[in-house]
Image (cartoon, grey):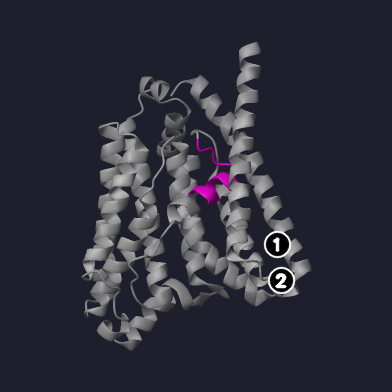
């Protein structure tokens, strides 16, 4: 990759860092503001629950952010979440051991990621159309797995002890006083953050989002890189499916509904540009925190669900608007130069 591309990536990373810091600052201010309104929000118990609930938004945010940075989108995330939850829960409710059920769900979810990568990266289908198709296919799979009905309790098949072990590992259990669901999401965040910031694959992902033609000329394998990004997204959705399965102790065909949009929200609130090439997963972490704090705080103070959605929608639009304005300003300065 030439020096010009490297400098461009560094500039975009710096821009992403500023947006991430703003998101973190907003998260802290938001949390304190809700705490002033209702001190219950500031209790340690509520904070732990907030972090646990934030895990699923962080994971779909990671998956969607990686895709957005390439300049694409993944509408299938929520449906892949449902596929993961239904396959794993169905198999466990029928007496199949948890490790095999989880492995089967993983393979199926990664298959959807691979298909997305092939459609977008190789056949150049518009990502909106390609992932819209796989969204319906994945949701249909979730429906068909257990004969168009939700599953029985997983403990009814693998037994109470094994069922509780699965639930504790993915949701109810704690390590160092913090729920495992958060630790799982945080570990995946660290791995993907390292991949995006310190590896060639990460540099290629940013390069494609910045200028796909320049990336090709620099020797980037666009098909392989795009496919990797969709596989990361599918893996994150798979883990969210397990978390939801553990939380409910069963599989729900409607699990993950709208999670693809939650992922977009977490990313753009944290400074990931939906136009591609800009943003840091550090910002996505903060964006997921802002999203969950809004949901948690507005719920505790008794705000209607409709108002919660309106507030979050306004914030998402504002974040994207800021990104567009900043990009136009940078573009104007370059044109004058």
Is residue 278 shown above or below 288? Answer: above
Q: Quick check: can you spot residue 337?
A: no
Question: Which residue lies at the image location 34% right of the left edge and 31% below the top edge?
Answer: 222
Residue at which label 1 appears = 31
**Span of residues in magenta:** 264-274
In the image, is 3 to the left or to the right of 215?
right
In the picture, the disc for residue 175 is none
User: Mark on residue 42?
Assistant: 2
Tell me if residue 326 comes above or below residue 302 in the rendering: above
- Report the residue that reaches farthest toward the top: 337
Q: CA distance from mark 2 to mark 1?
A: 8 Å
Q: Are marks 2 and 1 in contact (CB under 8 Å)?
A: yes
Q: Residue at x 62, y 56 (%)?
A: 290
| Side (left or right) of 59 relative to 107 | right
Q: Residues within 10 Å of mark 2 (few under 14, many from 20)?
A: some
Quadrant where the C terminus lies? top right
Q: Residue at x 26, y 58 (%)?
A: 140
Residue 304 percent location from the top left of the image: 62, 66
Residue placed farthest to the bottom in the image?
Answer: 160
Q: Earlier in the sequence, mark 2 or mark 1?
A: 1
Magenta-drawn stretch contains 286: no
Secondary structure at badge 1 equals helix
Residue 103 located left or right of residue 176: left
Quarter of the image holding residue 255?
Answer: bottom left
């Amino acid at each position: 990759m030439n020096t010009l591309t490297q400098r461009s990536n560094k500039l975009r990373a710096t821009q992403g860092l500023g947006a991430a810091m703003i998101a973190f600052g907003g998260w802290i201010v938001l949390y304190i503001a809700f705490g002033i309104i209702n001190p219950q929000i500031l209790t340690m118990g509520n904070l732990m629950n907030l972090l646990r609930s934030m895990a699923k938004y962080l994971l779909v945010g990671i998956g969607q952010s990686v895709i957005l940075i390439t300049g694409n989108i993944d509408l299938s995330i929520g449906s892949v979440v449902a596929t993961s939850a239904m396959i794993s829960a169905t198999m466990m409710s029928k007496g199949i051991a948890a490790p095999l059920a989880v492995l089967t769900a993983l393979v199926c979810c990664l298959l959807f990621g691979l298909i997305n990568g092939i459609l977008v990266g190789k056949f150049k289908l518009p990502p909106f159309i390609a992932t819209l198709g796989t969204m319906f296919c994945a949701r249909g799979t979730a429906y068909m797995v257990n004969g168009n009905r939700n599953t029985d309790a997983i403990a009814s098949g693998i037994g109470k002890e094994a069922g509780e072990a699965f639930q504790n590992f993915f949701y109810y259990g704690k390590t160092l006083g913090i729920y495992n669901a958060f630790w799982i999401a945080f570990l995946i965040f660290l791995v993907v953050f390292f991949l995006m910031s310190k590896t060639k694959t990460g540099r290629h992902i940013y390069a494609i989002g910045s200028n796909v033609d320049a990336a090709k000329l620099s020797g980037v394998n666009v098909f392989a890189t795009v496919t990797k990004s969709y596989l990361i997204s599918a893996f994150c959705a798979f883990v969210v499916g397990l978390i939801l399965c553990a939380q409910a102790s069963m599989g729900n065909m409607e699990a993950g509904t709208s999670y693809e949009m939650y992922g977009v929200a977490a990313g753009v609130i944290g400074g990931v540009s939906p136009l591609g090439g800009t943003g840091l997963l550090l910002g996505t972490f903060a964006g997921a925190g802002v999203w969950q704090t809004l949901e948690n705080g507005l719920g505790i103070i008794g705000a209607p669900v409709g108002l919660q959605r309106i507030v979050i929608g306004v914030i998402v639009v504002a974040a994207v608007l800021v990104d567009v304005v900043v990009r136009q300003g940078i573009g104007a300065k370059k044109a004058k130069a």
